[in-house]
Amino acid sequence: MRNGLRINKKQSMLDKRKKDKVIAKYKTHKDDTGSPEVQIAILSEEIKELTDHLKEHKKDFSSRRGLLRKIGQRRRLMRYLEKENLKSFEELVKKLKLRKMKIDEGSTQKDKTPGAVPIEKPKEKIKEEN
């Protein structure tokens, strides 16, 4: 508080100290800062912080949009890493405790989500006569 007024200090999503810790934990070589593994880890931390922020501020739609954008970016990077280096992808998913994406090879462009599995309609019950 300064002069009886509360100062709202705007926080960036990931301060330098936290970001450096994430980079140190997930880097693949000594000078690594931009490998897919590091980018995915940084995005995951930002997503966690945004999720916590949105639990408190439910009507913050601009932050919600930012969250969705970060989730999409992480999804694309994970898809790339899975194609290029499956072993590294699986290790990263285990370290970050993420769910693996389900990819169905039979999906079509008409599906709303890539790799979506079509929902089958329930079969009608056949009444048996006694």
Image: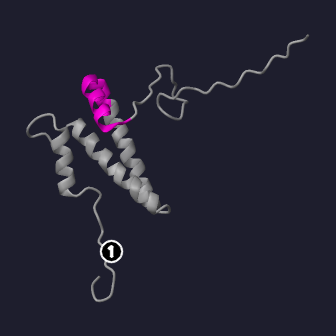
Q: Which residue is mark 1?
A: 8
Q: Is residue 34 visible?
A: no
Image quadrant where one finds the N terminus: bottom left
At 30% from the left edge and 68% from the top edge, which residue is drawn? 10
Looking at the rendering, the stretch of residues picked out in magenta corresponds to 80-98
Furthest residue toward right: 130
The kind of secondary structure element at disc 1 is loop
At 21% from the left edge and 46% from the top edge, which residue is drawn? 22
Density class for disc 1 (Cα within 10 Å; few <14, some 14-19, many ≥20) is few
Instruction: Confirm whether the magenta stretch covers residue 96.
Output: yes
Q: Viewer-proximal residue, 87 or 128?
A: 128
Furthest residue toward left: 30
Q: Is residue 59 left or right of residue 67?
A: right
Q: Quadrant of residue 80 in the image?
A: top left
Find residue 38 and report its horizontal and vertical position in percent: 22, 40
Q: Taken as a whole, is the magenta stretch helix, strand or loop?
A: helix
